[in-house]
Amino acid sequence: MKTMLPISASYRRAIYDALIVQVILGVLAMMVLDGGHMAHTTGIALLAFWSGAAVIIIRRPMAPTQTDLWLIRFGSLPLIVVTASLAEWIWSGHWIWKIHGG
């Protein structure tokens, strides 16, 4: 018995492209010698990405817009950059001094 998700075929190509991009980015993140921080940050970003992709697909399973397809195909790239920037800012502790007024 073959089961298929009832989604548009254009989603399938975008998901395939996203997986290729993310495998490459994941391998590159694991190659960074920083004690695993970049790999963890990339993992967090990719989990957030697939959560967002699931929401997009659930909202419009048969009629994706061009923006939907672009976000699924390439949305992980800016998300990884933003996540890495926020993680660096939070882990550095600079935000603590702003809260304390220092």
Image (tube, helix red, strand yellow):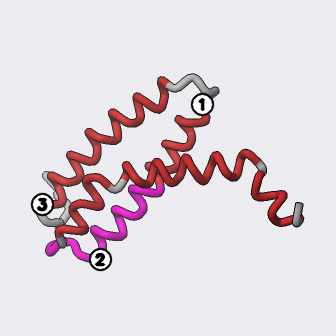
Q: Earlier in the sequence, mark 2 or mark 3?
A: 3
Residue sitting nearer the eye, 95 or 27: 95
Q: Amino acid at mark 2?
A: Arg
Q: How far is the residue under mark 1 from the one under mark 3?
A: 35 Å
| Disc number lying in front (2 or 1) | 1
Residue sitting nearer the eye, 58 or 44: 44
Main secondary structure along the magenta-highlighted residues: helix
Q: Give the crowd class for mark 3: few <14, some 14-19, many >=20 residues within 10 Å.
A: some
Secondary-structure class at tag 3 = helix
Magenta-span inclusion, residue 52: yes
Residue where numbered disc 3 is placed: 10
Q: Amino acid at mark 3?
A: Ser
The residue lying at 41 percent from left, 56 percent from top is 49
Residue where numbered disc 1 is placed: 36
Residue 25 image offset from top left, x and y in percent: 38, 36
User: For the magenta stretch, what is the residue range?
Assistant: 48-64
Q: Earlier in the sequence, mark 2 or mark 1?
A: 1
The residue lying at 31 percent from left, 69 percent from top is 56
Q: Classify the position of the C terminus by image quarter.
A: bottom right
Residue where numbered disc 2 is placed: 59
